[in-house]
């Protein structure tokens, strides 16, 4: 895929080899690697809860495994060692909520956390990253983001088909988990900025994607407004 003129102009101004860039990258790259690893295991666990979609979910899990390999290569390419301890802590709260939901076979909460919240977060982050990424990472991220739309779509379709019986559960899971996303965004704001990614743009992309998904599942505009406002208290 050819670079857009805008991307050429922006990436001309970024020095990917500075100590500052590589230090920020050690945390953001780790977050992405850890996120992909957790997404892999989340889809395998979802495959256990949804035997009728088992094969599809295993395919999604395998995509996440490939994403992890791709982003690991991006860090190596910049000679960066990912700070995996930081990344594990970064995901701890969402990870623990997913595990609690899995333990009670709460498919709706598991799907909301992985296939809606985490996928929308990934789609926002990857779309904002692509124009400012180094050429190697840009190519990889462009391939990855296409898959993330498929993952989001899986969650949307399942939840749409089970909307009436899932609605209250979704609202509750949204209330519990959306504020965590804003805390996570605040934690990476400074590092993201060093990579050329503005927090405002990340929030905007996330909210557009997440709101659109809630609408597809069956929520009214009024519900979507109410559910989106949950994050703002964090
Ligand atoms: O479904 C997926 O592949 C998601 C796990 C990946 C998560 C990516 C999280 C990206 C957050 C990056 C924050 C950068 C500002
Ligand atoms: Fe992924
Ligand atoms: Fe993903
Ligand atoms: Fe994904």
Image (cartoon, rainbow, N blue to C red):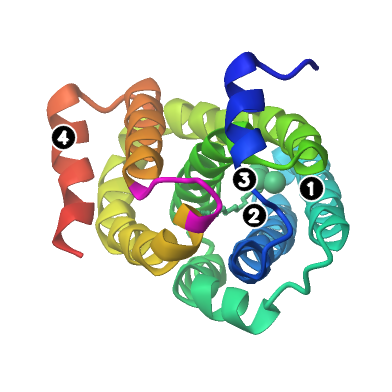
| Of the pair 117 and 171, the residue shown nearer to us | 117
Of the residues tagged 2 and 1, which is closer to the observer? 1
- Disc 3 target residue: 14
Q: Quadrant of the N terminus?
A: top right
- Disc 1 target residue: 67
Badge 1: residue crowd in 10 Å (few <14, some 14–19, many ≥20): many
Q: CA distance from mark 3 to mark 4?
A: 37 Å
- Disc 2 target residue: 49
Establish whether ligand 1 lies closer than 8 Å to the Cβ of label 3: no
Q: CA distance from mark 3 to mark 2?
A: 45 Å
The answer to whether marks 4 and 2 mark residues whose Cβ atoms lie closer than 8 Å is no
Dominant secondary structure (helix, strand or loop) of the stretch shown in magenta: loop
In which quarter of the view is residue 8 placed? top right
Of the residues tagged 3 and 2, which is closer to the observer? 3
Q: Is residue 231 above or below residue 204?
A: below
- Disc 4 target residue: 225
SS state under label 2? helix
Residue at 25% over, 47% down = 168
Badge 2: residue crowd in 10 Å (few <14, some 14–19, many ≥20): some
Give the mark nearer the N terminus: 4 vs 2: 2
């Amino acid at each position: 895929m050819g670079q857009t003129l805008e991307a050429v102009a922006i990436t001309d101004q970024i020095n990917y080899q500075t100590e500052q860039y590589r230090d920020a990258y050690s945390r953001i790259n780790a977050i992405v690697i850890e996120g992909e690893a957790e997404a892999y295991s989340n889809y395998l666990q979802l495959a256990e809860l949804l035997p009728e979609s088992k094969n599809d979910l295993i395919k999604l899990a395998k995509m996440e495994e490939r994403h992890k390999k791709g982003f690991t290569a991006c860090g190596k390419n910049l000679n960066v060692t990912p700070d995996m301890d930081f990344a594990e802590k970064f995901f701890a709260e969402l990870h623990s909520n997913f595990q609690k939901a899995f333990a009670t076979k709460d498919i709706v909460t598991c799907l909301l956390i992985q296939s809606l919240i985490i996928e929308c977060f990934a789609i926002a982050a990857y779309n904002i990253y692509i124009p400012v990424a180094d050429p190697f990472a840009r190519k990889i991220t462009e391939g990855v983001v296409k898959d993330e739309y498929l993952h989001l779509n899986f969650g949307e379709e399942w939840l749409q088909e089970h909307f009436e019986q899932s609605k209250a559960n979704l609202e509750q899971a949204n209330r519990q988990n959306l504020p965590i996303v804003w805390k996570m965004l605040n934690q990476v704001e400074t590092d993201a900025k060093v990579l050329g990614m503005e927090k405002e743009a990340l929030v905007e992309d996330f909210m557009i994607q997440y709101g659109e998904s809630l609408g597809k599942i069956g929520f009214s505009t009024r519900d979507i407004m109410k559910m989106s406002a949950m994050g703002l208290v964090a």
